[in-house]
Image (spheres, helix red, strand yellow):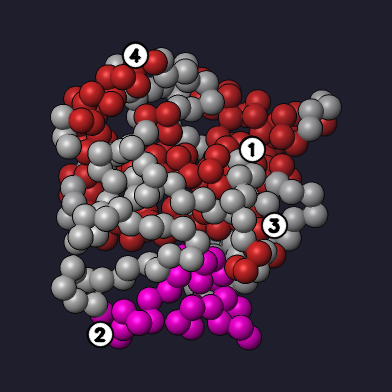
Amino acid sequence: MDIKYLNIDPAQIVDKITKSPKFEDLLYWIHGTAHNNIHIFLSYSMQTQGSPDEPMFFMHHGNVDRLLHYWMDCHEYDKIEPRSLSTTHYVSINPTDATSSNPHTAKDANGNKYDTSLDSIVPLFVSAEGSFKYCLSSEFPKVRDMWSMGTADKKGWNGLFYRYGPDALATSSLSSACKAGNTWTWVNYGRSKRSNSEEEMGTPEEMMLYQNLSRKFDDKVQEGLTPQEAITDLAMESCKANPQIELPEKELKYLMMMGVDFSASKRICDEDITVEDIEMENNMAMSFK
């Protein structure tokens, strides 16, 4: 099977997020593309179960969390109260899903598949035997409790209150493809902790990238395309312009061991994965069971 690395830029990210109003549509992309493939791209210890020992691990996971909250903010789901969440905002699927056929579905010490529904408890155990001293098992949150990032006046679970600061992705014209009337409350918030200037949102190279994409986007809108059509055009152009790199067998096996759905690795310009590809994927997955 011709599985390849992804090469994505802000236009492809915004295109996927704005076209995915349902969590189920976003999940495989953010799990496979934004998360797993970056672990593999960085390689070395990031490609092992010891990845948390690598400092880049926390930078990477912080960005995955940022993209999730960009999705929430983009669709105005930051205005949804935890008690009002529906399957639009969260569904219990992934390798840990209780209904998953994946051979790597996570199980507890008794061999039962974990319940990952909105009202299931998040098991914050250090190990199977012990919990954090500063967070008793009786205080573990439900999935629903982790939805809100809290506010200065109304803190979230365990005093949770955080925001993502100045964000070039949110402030660029690309984000006009988000829900009409969108207001950013969870990302692009306040002042950066690392700068005295709200204008500094990245390196000069990063800012040049956003400026070029925004200019192309604005030109397409001026030509009569809707914001979503302009984003999709840009995403397609970027996808075709960036070469793909074939995934080595060793890393293909690693993806299998992690239970990655290869459909999550499909970019906007990539060909559909065939039935034969899926069968080969399943056969290889079973070999690691």
In which quadrant will I find the N terminus?
top left
Residue at mark 4 to residue at mark 3: CA–CA distance: 39 Å
Q: Main secondary structure of the magenta part?
A: loop
Query: Is residue 134 shown in magenta?
Result: yes
Please say if 264 is above or below 136. Answer: above
Marks 4 and 3 close (CB-CB < 8 Å): no
Of the numbered discs 2 and 1, the one sitting upstream in the chain is 1
Residue at mark 2 to residue at mark 1: CA–CA distance: 42 Å
Of the numbered discs 2 and 3, the one sitting upstream in the chain is 3
Q: Which residue is mark 1?
A: 19
Query: Is residue 137 shown in magenta?
Result: yes
Front residue of this view, candidates 103 and 51? 103
Residue at mark 4 to residue at mark 1: CA–CA distance: 28 Å
**Crowd band around label 1 with a 10 angstrom C-alpha radius: few (<14), some (14–19), many (20+):** some
- Residue 142, image quadrant: bottom left
Q: Which mark is nearer the camera, 4 or 1? A: 4
What's the magenta region?
132-160
Q: Which residue is mark 4?
A: 276
Marks 1 and 3 close (CB-CB < 8 Å): no
**Which residue is drawn at the image coordinates 31% and 70% (left, top)?**
124
